[in-house]
Image (cartoon, rainbow, N blue to C red):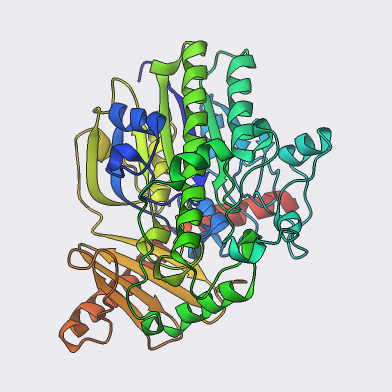
Amino acid sequence: MAKQPNIVFILTDQQRLDTIAANGFEHMDTPNLDRLVQRGAVFENMYVSAPSCSPSRAALFSGTYPHTNGVFRNEEPWSYCWVEELAKVGYRCVNVGKMHTNPVEGAFGFHERHVVENKDRDHPNLPFYLDNWDKALQARKVQKPSRVSYRKRPDYNESLGAFVWELDEDLHSDVFVGKTACWWLDRYSGDEPFFLQIGFPGPHPPYDPTQDYLDRYLDRDLPEAILDYDLASQPAPLRAIRQNQLDNDRDAIVHQEAPTQDQLHRQRACYYANVSMIDAQIGEIIDALDRRGVLDDTVIIFTSDHGDCLNDHGHSQKWTMYEQSVQVPAILCWPGNVEKASRHADLVSLMDFGPTILEIAGADIPRWMEAQSLGDLLFGNPKADRDCVFSEHANDRVVMDTNFMTMVRNGPWKLVHFVDSDEGQLFNLDNDPEERVNLWNSPAHADTCRELIDKILTWRIESARKTQGFVQMLANRQREARS
């Protein structure tokens, strides 16, 4: 390339697939994301490597699965981040907002980090940390809305984590992150190419839009929760996850056994309204790039770390392998290089954005990366060499009745395997896109189950061989640090 492009990598937290109007979801107001869809490429089958925050992000920013990089849970330390490869080839690397790294403010290759973490960290089991948003709230002498303050409300137990933001709008975490990113774009005086990672904390709960955004959705027809089948038919590990959600008010959500339609509608209205708030900030970021005179020289990537069930299948938030939890929206816009309004139905993994960004930047892609660059799809040379995508999750504070679960998607088939259970899930997504009919115990599909479990076995063996260089690199770094 004659010139390295700037790269703006926008990552939301917990944004499910049905949240962009231009992707066919007419209940949404997302004019700025629609603009990116029209100007770039959409990946219609983007799957996360793990359905929770830090494991998904550590996979994304290392190009390796949790079983390789060792980040199975939110508080586990990161060992590598490919941002350092961008710094080596001349990029100014800046993070604004959430990345959910450990340590929270570790450099990880960035020259600057302006960290904003989860909306609700008021829990004694979470590490104490004051981020930039906390400091802004303190400067205004206001208490951050969280489960601590929301528990005082008389409607707390009925709200399903859906509340109205009552402080000044510029103090909302998503507005604060968006405006900080714009501030950086307006103020930075360097002329080298930049990699700007922007991490919006929303629409992760609490679902807390301002009233004006919520008003757009309260009287609108919204997708209804998938509940019209027997929840007791779920495998025991999933029933245990659901019970854990019912027993704990995680992220200010008091999950309920049988919420009313009004409760479900309000929860979804708040969630979708929060997405629209983020969309408005994305518009501000696009305008800031234009003011800087670099909009046409900038790659803009938009995606999310995982989805949110929003009571689909009776579950709260993520931690399962249902489509609403593991499939996310994904857009890449690069004027003059990527075909406008193009769509790719290939199975791809969220962590594939890592080597894609390195390729665009002209940086070396480590041979041990399990992620695969999306460049062949984007630039017209599809290899179609990935017939499966995988996602995995270990036991943690929510997933407590299984030590490990693995999902494989192959063609229309999706299988979920639990390492310590005879139960599992098998769905044909062509015939059953809402995953109502579990075929795991169907004799007619026993061969399909065996074939997909064999694919998991083969993948794990090939993974160990592929990532040998990654393990050796980390060992070398540890030796150098000791010496």
Picture layout, residue 480 above or below residue 312:
above
Seen at 34% across and 48% down, the residue is: 372
Count of number-bearing discs? 0
* Residue 245 visible in the snapshot: yes
Q: Is residue 322 left or right of residue 468?
A: left
Picture layout, residue 378 above or below residue 99:
above
Seen at 54% across and 53% down, the residue is: 58
Q: From the image, which quarter does the N terminus lie in?
A: top left
For the residue pair 461 and 256, the one nearer the viewer reads as 256
Q: Is residue 405 left or right of residue 199?
A: left
For the residue pair 377 and 330, the one nearer the viewer reads as 330
Picture layout, residue 380 above or below residue 127:
above
Q: Position of residue 464 (x, y in %)?
A: 43, 65
Q: Position of residue 262 (x, y in %)?
A: 47, 60
Quarter where residue 357 is shown: top left
Seen at 75% across and 54% down, the residue is: 149
For the residue pair 409 and 206, the one nearer the viewer reads as 206
Q: Position of residue 302 (x, y in %)?
A: 42, 37
Q: Position of residue 73 (x, y in %)?
A: 59, 64
For the residue pair 374 and 409, the one nearer the viewer reads as 409
Seen at 70% across and 50% down, the residue is: 103
* Residue 50 visible in the snapshot: no
